[in-house]
Amino acid sequence: MTVSTGRQASRLKNDLIDAIGDTPLVEVPGLSPNPHVRIFAKLEGHNPTGSVKDRVAKYLVMDAEKRGALKSGQTIIEPTSGNTGIGLAMIARIRGYKMKAVMPGSVGPERVQLLKAFGAEVIFSAPDKGTNESIILAQELARSNPSWFMPYQYGNQANPLAHYETTGPEIIRDMPGVDVFVAGLGTGGTLMGVGRRLKEHNPAVKVVATAPHPDDVVQGLRSIEHGFIPPILDLGMLDGRILIELEEGLYWTKWLLDHAGIFVGESSGAVAATARKVAEKMERGNIVCLFADSGWKYISSGIYTKDFKEITKSETQGKIWW
C-alpha cells in the first residue's frame, strides 16, 4: 500500500455543479482480445446525475448565462432521451430555472421519475419515432413560447466544448499514451470535443464511433442512416465508425458487470464491443473508451439479472436508453 505524504490538492467543491467531471479512468482486465493492447474505460457514471451529459448540461447553461440568453426564473426546454434532460433539470433546480424535457413516450420509467424529482415537466413525443420527433416537438414549442430558452444540444457548440475543455484533458492527464478513443455516436459532442483535443495532443490518435446497425437498435446510439445528422457532428473527424448489433451490445453490457463489476448502460456495452474489434486489428497500444452512464436508470429493463439471450428484441425495441 502506498501512503501519500505532503499536502494534497483540495477536493472541496463549491456546489454540486462544481463536482461535475474529473471521472475515473480504469483499466478493464480481460476485455482486450490482444495481450499487447490495453483497454481503459472513462466511467462517466460517476458524475452527479450518473452520466456524461452532466458535463454538457453545465456548459449549455454556463454559455447561455454568459451570453445573456438565460436569466433567473426563465424556462429551459430541451429535447432529450433522458440524460441531458436530467443534467439540465439538476442544474435548473440549483440555478433557479424552470425545466421542460421533451422526450419519446417509450423512455424507461427511471428517467421520467428522475426528471420529475428534480422538478422538471416531462412532455412526451410519439413513442415510436425516437428523439428525432422529440426535436421537432421541442422546436415547435420553443417557437410558440419565445420567452423559453432551448439550448439545443444537437447544434450547440457548447456541447463539444465541454469535452474539449474537460473530458479530453482528463484523458491526456491520466493516459498520455492513448492511441485510440472510442465513444458512442449520439449527438456527436463527445466524439468531436474529445477527438479534437486528443488529436492536438497527438495527431496520430484515432477516433472511432460506435453506432447501431441501421436495421437494428442499440439503445442510446444514433444511426446516421436514419436521416438526421446533428449539426455539431463532423464526420470527417472520425477515423472509423463500427456498427454494433443489439445482441452484441447486450452481451458486453452483461459481461462488464459479471466480469469487471462495471455497472453501465447498454450503449457502454456497445462501446466495449467496438473497443474489442479495434484491439483485434492493432499490434499494440492503448484504447480509451468512454462509458457514458451507469446502469441505474435502466434497472426496469431487466438486462442485468437475465441472461442476455433471454432479452429479445421485442423487449427492448423502441426503448430509448441514453
Image (spheres, rainbow, N blue to C red):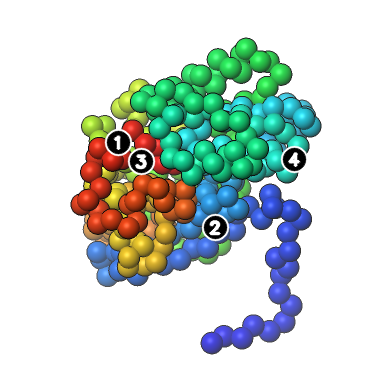
Q: Position of residue 263 (x, y in %)?
A: 42, 59
Distance, label 1 to label 4, CA atoms, is 36 Å
Which quadrant of the rendered structure holds the N terminus? Answer: bottom right
Q: Which numbered dot is residue 46?
A: 2
Task: Work out whether 50 lies above or below 231.
Answer: below
Q: Amino acid at mark 3?
A: Gln
How dense is the environment of label 1, judged by Cα within 10 Å: few (below 14), some, or many (20 and up)?
Answer: some
Residue 306 locus on image (x, y percent):
28, 56
**The C terminus, quarter of image:** top left
Q: Secondary structure at mark 2?
A: helix
- Check if mark 2's residue and mark 4's residue have beta carbons within 8 Å: no
- Tag 1 residue: 317
Q: In the image, which is nearer the foreground, mark 2 or mark 1? A: 1
- The image shows a total of numbered marks equal to 4
Q: Residues within 10 Å of mark 4 (few under 14, many from 20)?
A: some
Residue at 39% in and 27% down:
127
Instruction: Measure how far apart labels 2 and 3 are at the Cα level.
Output: 20 Å
Residue 321 in view: yes
Classify residue 121 by image quadrant: top right
| In the foreground, 81 or 11 | 81
Q: CA distance from mark 3 to mark 4?
A: 31 Å
Q: Is residue 248 left or right of residue 1?
A: left
User: Which residue is identified by label 3?
Assistant: 219
Q: Residue at x 51, y 58 (%)?
A: 171
Circle 3/circle 4 CB separation < 8 Å: no
Please report whichever mark, 1 or 3, sits nearer to the chain's N-terminal start: 3
Number of other residues with Cα within 10 Å of mark 3, as a class: few under 14, some 14 to 19, many 20 or more: many
Identify the residue position indicated by label 4 in the image: 95
